[in-house]
Amino acid sequence: MRLPHKQTTKDIDFAIIGVPSDAGASFRTGQREGPAAIRKVSALLRHHNPILNVSPFEHLSGVDYGDLSVIPGYIEDSFKEIEKDLLPVVEAGVVPILLGGDHAITLPELRVVAKKHGPIALVHFDAHSDTSDEYFGKPYNHGTPFARAVEENLLLVNHSIQVGLRGSTYSENHLEIPKKLGFEIITMAELQEMGVEKLIQRIQKRIGDKKVFLSFDVDFVDPAFAPGTGTPEVGGVTSGEAITIIRGLKDLNFVGFDIVEVLPALDPSEITALLASNIAYEFISILAYQKNQVV
Amino acid sequence: MRLPHKQTTKDIDFAIIGVPSDAGASFRTGQREGPAAIRKVSALLRHHNPILNVSPFEHLSGVDYGDLSVIPGYIEDSFKEIEKDLLPVVEAGVVPILLGGDHAITLPELRVVAKKHGPIALVHFDAHSDTSDEYFGKPYNHGTPFARAVEENLLLVNHSIQVGLRGSTYSENHLEIPKKLGFEIITMAELQEMGVEKLIQRIQKRIGDKKVFLSFDVDFVDPAFAPGTGTPEVGGVTSGEAITIIRGLKDLNFVGFDIVEVLPALDPSEITALLASNIAYEFISILAYQKNQVV
Amino acid sequence: MRLPHKQTTKDIDFAIIGVPSDAGASFRTGQREGPAAIRKVSALLRHHNPILNVSPFEHLSGVDYGDLSVIPGYIEDSFKEIEKDLLPVVEAGVVPILLGGDHAITLPELRVVAKKHGPIALVHFDAHSDTSDEYFGKPYNHGTPFARAVEENLLLVNHSIQVGLRGSTYSENHLEIPKKLGFEIITMAELQEMGVEKLIQRIQKRIGDKKVFLSFDVDFVDPAFAPGTGTPEVGGVTSGEAITIIRGLKDLNFVGFDIVEVLPALDPSEITALLASNIAYEFISILAYQKNQVV
Amino acid sequence: MRLPHKQTTKDIDFAIIGVPSDAGASFRTGQREGPAAIRKVSALLRHHNPILNVSPFEHLSGVDYGDLSVIPGYIEDSFKEIEKDLLPVVEAGVVPILLGGDHAITLPELRVVAKKHGPIALVHFDAHSDTSDEYFGKPYNHGTPFARAVEENLLLVNHSIQVGLRGSTYSENHLEIPKKLGFEIITMAELQEMGVEKLIQRIQKRIGDKKVFLSFDVDFVDPAFAPGTGTPEVGGVTSGEAITIIRGLKDLNFVGFDIVEVLPALDPSEITALLASNIAYEFISILAYQKNQVV
Amino acid sequence: MRLPHKQTTKDIDFAIIGVPSDAGASFRTGQREGPAAIRKVSALLRHHNPILNVSPFEHLSGVDYGDLSVIPGYIEDSFKEIEKDLLPVVEAGVVPILLGGDHAITLPELRVVAKKHGPIALVHFDAHSDTSDEYFGKPYNHGTPFARAVEENLLLVNHSIQVGLRGSTYSENHLEIPKKLGFEIITMAELQEMGVEKLIQRIQKRIGDKKVFLSFDVDFVDPAFAPGTGTPEVGGVTSGEAITIIRGLKDLNFVGFDIVEVLPALDPSEITALLASNIAYEFISILAYQKNQVV
Amino acid sequence: MRLPHKQTTKDIDFAIIGVPSDAGASFRTGQREGPAAIRKVSALLRHHNPILNVSPFEHLSGVDYGDLSVIPGYIEDSFKEIEKDLLPVVEAGVVPILLGGDHAITLPELRVVAKKHGPIALVHFDAHSDTSDEYFGKPYNHGTPFARAVEENLLLVNHSIQVGLRGSTYSENHLEIPKKLGFEIITMAELQEMGVEKLIQRIQKRIGDKKVFLSFDVDFVDPAFAPGTGTPEVGGVTSGEAITIIRGLKDLNFVGFDIVEVLPALDPSEITALLASNIAYEFISILAYQKNQVV
């Protein structure tokens, strides 16, 4: 997006932050190259968002904060690094827009955001619930972050919602797991039946005026539109629908965003990275829209 | 799918069987690598199918039977090999789920199935009718299998249906050919008009309670969702629609399935193979669902 | 399409003409390889168009005229070459079907067509308006052709229409620019609301019986269906919708067509080139349909 | 090479002829796309060969004769087609330069050449001897052509030589097979010891003044230099060495050439096709050099 | 290599074992897919090794033991898994031939081998010494295994040698580090000066009759011959030279081998995997040669 | 190389500068992405050069100056931009290390350097002489820069040398053209005969103590080692030889360097970009070595 590259939190509204970690990836790996790929194609983004009718960089001040440190092979230490590096940003009141990285990174992000704001609501778009208790006998990886987030009291789970779940599951009652944790669940089958408009209302109603973090796994979108990802599932939304849904949430009270699981090695035409950069652009546009509204 | 690899037909319900042949491919070739590619990504499939609400591997016993023998350059001899190797599976009452390979292989498959069951109904999803009388002056290749199958009396053609035909054709009356052979035809244009629900009813009505073989050419699906194939046609269904259609046929009396024309060399993100593995998973799920119903 | 390769204008109705230029490409380049890629996959096209019910090569006489000359690094001289080479074709009453190349080439094409026919109407499918006043301080490139065409009086701008605009824009009033020039604009958001049928009517009404040139940028289509292009925008139409729209215009009075911005280096499965070849096939089919109607 | 495309044998010295067959490929397939790939990159070749100091297209008249017909799935019928199409070229005294296709095609080529010239000498560059008695129980494929050629009396086997054999073999005495058939064999290990200069002398001595056919399998060259091929073997010559060897044979009495086993799907940088086009260019240069010598 | 797939150690001489770990990869990742890629192309290997004149599968009994367990994100726990799974193989006197995976896996391998045999000699081919004290502040990753191996007393370091070091280094005295640990070092520059024959003698002399483990990082070979790897360095040996060197060590007393750092995502023509499979084949051939000698 | 990114010329010794232009590319295009690709893989370079025994970033101060402006489609205007942007760097006494871009960019570079230093010597490594009088009737593109440089009196042509010329040529006397302009020429055939050591001496002798600019076209290197380039020629040097040659010139009096014609779209394994980054590293190392010598 051709933002200034600097590690500052002074007088800025948002920061684009890469989290080049794939330590939590169970199947395919290479998500560490996601942030670089998203930045590269973000050169295609332009000044004005005509749908929300905002020119985000006029209303907001933002930086490209660079990448957080991670330690390959040591996911728990990587989390500590991420938390340490992210905390000053969040503490300064800057809204972080994080580019993954596999989905495991959302846990340390939520830890930092909750340290600042207390437990928060979550809007989670994904083909998978990512609420398994463990994988390979281990508590931290890209299949478990939201189980941990609930256990660690980082979420207002009664105001949190997961959207887009589909595909085969590990067990018969797999979709019961997030429900038992307290999440509202909208599967892809339900989404198709209700349509995008009603989905937006459901999310708005669930979140209300709570502070909310939006976590977007690109596998929420169909593999035709987002082929470059770690665990694709056929039968997702189109990229146009994804962007419409996000724009529909423009009045929520966001305290952070991430977009995860872009895997450039499987994205030869760069359309997954392009989609991710557009989604990040919508996040920024929403912040600009909200600032405009206030004024 | 991490099934046991063994060539047995004892006490099993279904067998996954690769047919690595591309001897019948007229344009692009490399479909012989289809079975390996489908197996590779099938590691993404999990235990439970939440839509049909079955855990197929609990209710069914299945094996990965490996690949049948083929002889490059000798399609007619390859057919004999396929028939010889497949016959004991079908004779044992095991339902074969065959992974192609180009579409020519469906002919020897039907020969074997008809040897066991007599003439059977056919549900055929494809952008092309594959009922040409000949290509290059020859009777056997991926443009002719269903013309041969009718001639050889392998089909209950009055209970057979072809779905999804589209694109430019070899001659003005090309779509009349399968109709004259006795098939019911639903073109892609007709499908779009009637919708998925009505299509399922049309197929159910056509097949009734006959024993039926389902043949799925991945080019039935739009090239955006299935780019890795030999003769793609723009304007097909989405992968989500394809799976919904197949699930809708869960009460038919299946005696065999195939999924053909996956071409890995043109599938850099592996989404075509992923789709094919999901379709095979639905086939297995249907068998499990039916076994459940009986109990 | 296996047309005869010759540079003749005698007794022919249409000519397929490559314009291997990417001198106007601002971001990614390599569109010069577009014509070769489209020709390669056009071998998949067949004799008969069952939807328009015409066998175009029976009713029409056409040639593959080869590629026009271009001069890398010298866009203005390239335009002169294109105009010089294209003029005899258009003067002879042959309808040109031009394969790009980046979108800058439409300007010299329109100059030639207008020299023969006077100012003409334009139907322009694209994610972008391409009516910027300049890029990099220069008047000629793939972001400006339609601004120049209006200035040079090549268009009946009151009978011209741009369809599919979307994505972020260079400035707040960017969509006002084409409107001020006189174009009717239908954004992608508006298209989704009105649907394909109503869009066709709007275009028909706008064009009326004027002589019309159709310019099709493949980025009108969503990147899932057309990944191989220079400046993709998420959220476009499907390839099936694109073809339906074009067919819907079968009664317009066409004097030329182009299909531009195919970039093979980003099209590993060749689906973008396949789509472009299908669109060119529809152009030819429309000409055949019209000739049929007259008879 | 931008030669005129026409199917004529009148007043021409050589003809470039594609043989888009991969019916004989045992492992990987897609060699049918070899001729198109070689032609595409041949645009990089220029007018003059400074090493042999000839401008081949000044001294010789040649055409691009197009592709011969083949029938996928029917290798024996394909051979008949190839023979039928190639015969008029060879009968007219034109030297054929054939672009494969898998190596099985050399057999029908030799049949035609021997029909005109009687049994001929062979210079064969390859990692493999291709003299197996059968593969998959069949006599015709890319592992057997030279066994058949000897049986059919097409070769002056006492004046024939195979160069570059290496890699693991099917049996302990595998390298004895071609020796028993009468070939002289120079393995890659022997080539490395003797060097390029001595190799050239050995070949010259073996062939003498006999009429000779040169068959060049790109896997003679190391996979680093020719990755796009069906059965690569590590440890081959460099592309520079290959060209030096061929130039060293400039005084032999050639009646035909082929270059086979280019597999574009595994040649993403097109360097294998580039090498093949350079080798074909050396063949033409040798013919020009010889014509010059005569004058 | 089409070996039987079973997890047995009974009556076998060697076992091919995958170690699909990339937890230690500092730069690029995806080495976890190395074992599958090597196995896939190993279908090109044949029965007999004509240079060592052995048919390894006649003289030896071997299995494909499958893959060892690893835990993404937890390198130290992965090491424990690898050790636990590998121990029974080594304890049974089976020679393990391990397919990586990144180079970090050599440490747990050496732990197991040393548990059985006591400290052993090491022949290590690599562009890098991999003897850093730490990376990212951590002791275990692909830059440190041989520092750890010395500290843990797993090596007879006075009989160990590293060959092929080249490229830029982390610090001025970086090449002193392995020397201080006790290794003999032969840089690529030294190798080029001494030649392959003398290198073999130097290695033989260094190792003597000690039990020895051979660790082969594919980046020892030049990137032209092995592009698919994590940290390539220009200026390495050719693949032919690599194989000659390994064969030259046929009389050493091997107790284990590995071949590491194959990264399929960067190996589009599969030549790196092909090289790795050939190197593994040479390892087996050496074992067969030695068994033959004894008899 | 993880250099600081800033546009300063104060207190620095060298500046890495991208020139993302492909306006001069006659055949393949996309060299504009070369600088980004080289920078990406330069993360693999480390602190110390053990062959020259220098730690360049300790002895020298350098910056990554970013990319110069270019104007697609307007090569002559692009030259003016390049000259305008580069002049302050050169005027400040900073040694520029320029990353192309196609080879046409060397002309404006030489203009700037000669403006500061007067006519300079040239060491030019390339498969092609690039001294054509014109291409497509135009004076400026990647086939002509050194003809223009001589005409414009930018070079001490009697102290200039071109190394590595090979491949087919446009005309019989093509290699005479640079000789007539005054260059010394060493063809690849001559290089192979004389060897690397003697080549270095020849270059040293030719240049003497003149101020010299080194221009390195990656197609000097064989396509196996540098596949990602616009006009590859088989039969070049290895990457190891290329680096040895450059190091051998460590005592010349350099005033500038460029490395051109990296084309990432044809470099799937990134080995061409890796080679280019290593060559740039050697340039920096030479500057460091020279500074060391002075001290």
Image (tube, coloured by chain):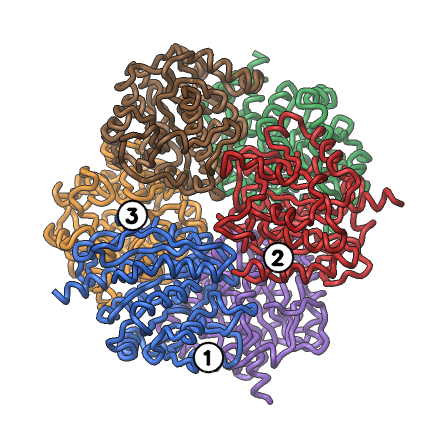
Chain colours: A purple, B orange, C blue, D brown, E green, F red
Element class at badge 3: loop
Write down the residue under mark 2. A21
Q: Earlier in the sequence, mark 3 or mark 1?
A: 3
**Direction right: furthest residue:** F295
Res. A15 image quadrant: bottom right
- Residue B6 in view, yes or no: yes
Locate residue B89, reporting x and y percent: 27, 38
The lab-note entry on whether marks 3 and 1 share a chain reads yes
Task: Please tell me whether residue C179 is drawn above or below residue A144 in the rendered image.
Answer: below
Going by the numbered disc 1, the residue's amino acid type is Ile
| Marked residue chain, label 1 | C
For residue C5, the mark is 3
Crowd rating for badge 1 (residues with CA inside 10 Å; few <14, some 14–19, many 20+): some
Locate residue E102, reporting x and y percent: 62, 42
For residue C177, the mark is 1
Res. E120 image quadrant: top right
Question: How many numbered marks, from 0 up?
Answer: 3
Crowd rating for badge 3 (residues with CA inside 10 Å; few <14, some 14–19, many 20+): some
